[in-house]
């Protein structure tokens, strides 16, 4: 009886191997082929500019306060007539994001009252030095890493519903505690 069990176990192993050998391979030839991701992928950050070309960031540091990993450093500075960075009285003189520390949670995007910090759908970074992973304000302003994504695609509301806001009623977001 022992030999029959062993043969049956080996046959079961061969059946499993044959089942997976006949499937279409899931391997992709990265980076020539790119995987298709969902609409909620949060990628590399960038700082947005207004329609007038000026910075939207007012240096309030709410994004740095919301960051659970402490990856964001903001040092505000008064806006002067000699340096008209934006139309408000303050701007971020220093805005750095340490991408090694970033966990791509998106809290910084949700905390920003000016919608100045946004995330692209590009998630892959391959650099040879750790210093290259600290994105400065200038790097974040040029947005060299891809196109923006609407934060409503991955926003979480109080009703525990995920997904784009435009697919749901506006009343759901007007007073989330009413449900």
Image (cartoon, helix red, strand yellow):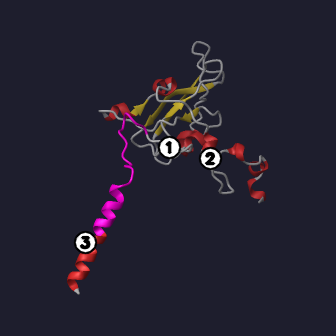
- Can you give x and y, in whole percent of width and height, for residue 158 in the image? 68, 55
Image quadrant containing the N terminus: bottom left
Of the two numbered discs 3 and 2 on the same chain, state the one appearing first in sequence.
3
Nearer the observer: mark 1 or 3; the answer is: 3
Could you tell me how far apart the alpha carbons at marks 1 and 2 are, in whole angstroms?
17 Å
Q: Is residue 78 rendered to the left or right of residue 69?
A: right
Q: Is residue 28 magenta?
A: yes
Q: How many labels does the image show?
A: 3
Q: Residue at x 61, y 29 (%)?
A: 58
Residue 72 part of the magenta segment: no
Read off the magenta span.
13-34
Tell which circle, 1 or 3, labels the residue nearer the N-terminal end: 3
**Label 1 secondary element:** loop
Q: Residue 144, relative to residue 1: is it above or below?
A: above
The span from disc 1 to disc 3 (Cα, nearest Å) is 38 Å
Residue 101 lies left or right of residue 15; in this view the side is right
Question: Helix, strand or loop at disc 2?
Answer: loop
Q: Where is residue 94 in the image (x, y as percent from the top left)?
A: 49, 28
- The C terminus lies in which quarter of the figure? bottom right
Q: Which mark is residue 10?
A: 3
Residue neighbourhood size for the residue with mark 2, other residues' Cα within 10 Å, grouped as few (<14), some (14–19), many (≥20): some
**Residue drawn at point x = 56 percent, y = 37 percent:** 61
In the image, farthest residue toward the bottom: 1
Residue at mark 1: 37
The 10 Å Cα crowd at callout 3, few under 14, some 14 to 19, many 20 or more, is: few
Q: Mark 2 points at which residue?
A: 155
- Would residue 94 be found to the left or right of residue 151 on screen? left
Between marks 3 and 2, how big is the CA–CA gap?
Answer: 49 Å
Q: Position of residue 166 (x, y in %)?
A: 71, 43
Q: Can residue 75 be seen by looking at this rendering?
A: no
Q: In this view, does 7 lie to the left or right of 68?
A: left
């Amino acid at each position: 009886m022992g030999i029959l069990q062993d043969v049956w176990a080996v046959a079961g192993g061969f059946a499993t191997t044959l089942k997976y050998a006949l499937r279409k391979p899931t391997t992709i030839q990265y980076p020539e082929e790119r995987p298709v991701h969902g609409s909620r992928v949060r990628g590399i950050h960038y700082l947005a500019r207004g329609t007038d070309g000026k910075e939207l960031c007012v240096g309030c540091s709410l994004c740095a306060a919301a960051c659970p990993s402490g990856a964001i450093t903001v040092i505000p500075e008064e806006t002067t007539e000699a340096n008209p960075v934006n139309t408000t009285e303050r701007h971020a003189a220093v805005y750095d994001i340490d991408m090694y520390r970033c966990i791509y949670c998106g809290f910084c995007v949700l905390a920003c009252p000016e919608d100045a910090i946004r995330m692209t759908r590009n998630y892959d970074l391959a650099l040879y030095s750790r210093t290259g992973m600290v994105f400065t304000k200038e790097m974040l302003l040029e947005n060299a890493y891809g196109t923006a994504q609407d934060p409503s695609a991955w926003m979480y509301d109080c009703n525990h519903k995920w997904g784009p806001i435009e697919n749901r009623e506006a009343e759901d977001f007007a007073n989330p505690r009413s449900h």
